[in-house]
Image: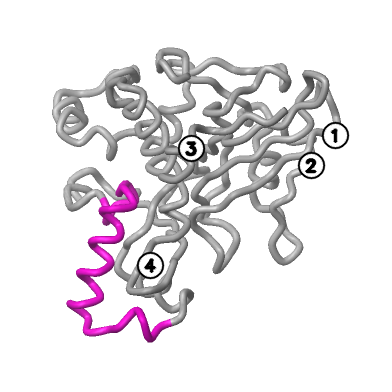
Amino acid sequence: MTKKLPNEVQIFIDKYFKLPLNGKNVPCPYYINIKKIKQRMGLRVLIGKGTPEEIIQESLIYEKLRGVDFSQMTVNEIKEFLIKRHIGIDCSGFVTHILDKWLIINGKKHIWKYLKWPKQNLYRIIARNFRPVENITAEMLTSDLNTIQIKNINNIKCGDLIRSRTPRRSNNLKYGNHVILISEINKTNGKVNSFEYVHSTCKYEDKHGVRRGKVIITKFNEPIYKQKWTDIYKGKNYTLKDLQSDKDYSQIRRLKNVPLL
């Protein structure tokens, strides 16, 4: 038995994987802005938080401004062009928009209306009210404030989240938080034998950005980092490596206040 995200949500996700840019389908690259809030007040598409439509529009504007022709460029050349203009999507922006789409097509409120926010000063409260997506982080999405841990892998559902941490070597941060969304679940005799996921990652070298992956369950009653993660690039599985870097933190989490079907 296979369970998937609603078809309309899958179509929405596909837009990130195939940005239609002058006859070319370009996978959205990764981009995150981790500078101070005062430097994050531009268009959300330029800080890793845009919808596919916003990313497409801004990319086509830059194409005209820079006098290039996407139709004469390769997909990789276009992707590099976008990266240089800070056009892309980060992990929390990607997951937030997917969940928000799911809620809206079911007649629910925007996802930020259901999330609980950590204690913040007045300035940040005002900022999040005007720019909610830009202020939703991977850490917030998967925190105890907004999620519960799913320990039994047979209980996972589409829309559940997986959190991990990745070591950083810059910006004075010891690590960065990452969030993955479970998009498909395959069961045999009531037990999960595999699941698929989507995320936007800074890893995988020139293939960074939106990616799909699959996990095969080989060890029941064992943590997710002990399962078989199949997204390997040039002999490396970056996603699994991050999960293993902080095993206590790496968990499957479920949003507890969001009315997803």
Residue under circle 4?
83
For the residues labelled 2 and 1, the Cα–Cα distance comes to: 7 Å
For the residues labelled 2 and 3, the Cα–Cα distance comes to: 27 Å
Q: Which one is earlier in the sequence, the residue at label 2 or at label 1?
A: 1
Q: Of tags 1 and 4, which is closer to the observer?
A: 1
Q: Are marks 3 and 1 in contact (CB under 8 Å)?
A: no
Element carrying mark 3: helix
Q: Amino acid at mark 4?
A: Ile
Residue under circle 1?
218
Q: Which one is earlier in the sequence, the residue at label 1 or at label 4?
A: 4
Q: Quadrant of residue 31?
A: bottom left
Residue 228's label in the rendered image is 2
Residue under circle 3?
7
For the residues labelled 1 and 4, the Cα–Cα distance comes to: 37 Å
Q: At which x and y percent is residue 1? A: 72, 28
Q: Which one is earlier in the sequence, the residue at label 3 or at label 1?
A: 3
Count residues near mark 1 (Cα–Cα under 10 Å), then give few for <14, some for 14-19, many for 20+.
Answer: few
Element carrying mark 1: loop
Q: Are marks 2 and 1 in contact (CB under 8 Å)?
A: yes
Element carrying mark 4: helix
Above or below, comparing residue 156 to residue 216 in the picture: above
Residue 247's label in the rendered image is none
Magenta span of residues: 45-73
Q: Amino acid at mark 2?
A: Lys
Q: Amino acid at mark 1?
A: Thr
Q: Which one is earlier in the sequence, the residue at label 4 or at label 2?
A: 4
Element carrying mark 2: strand
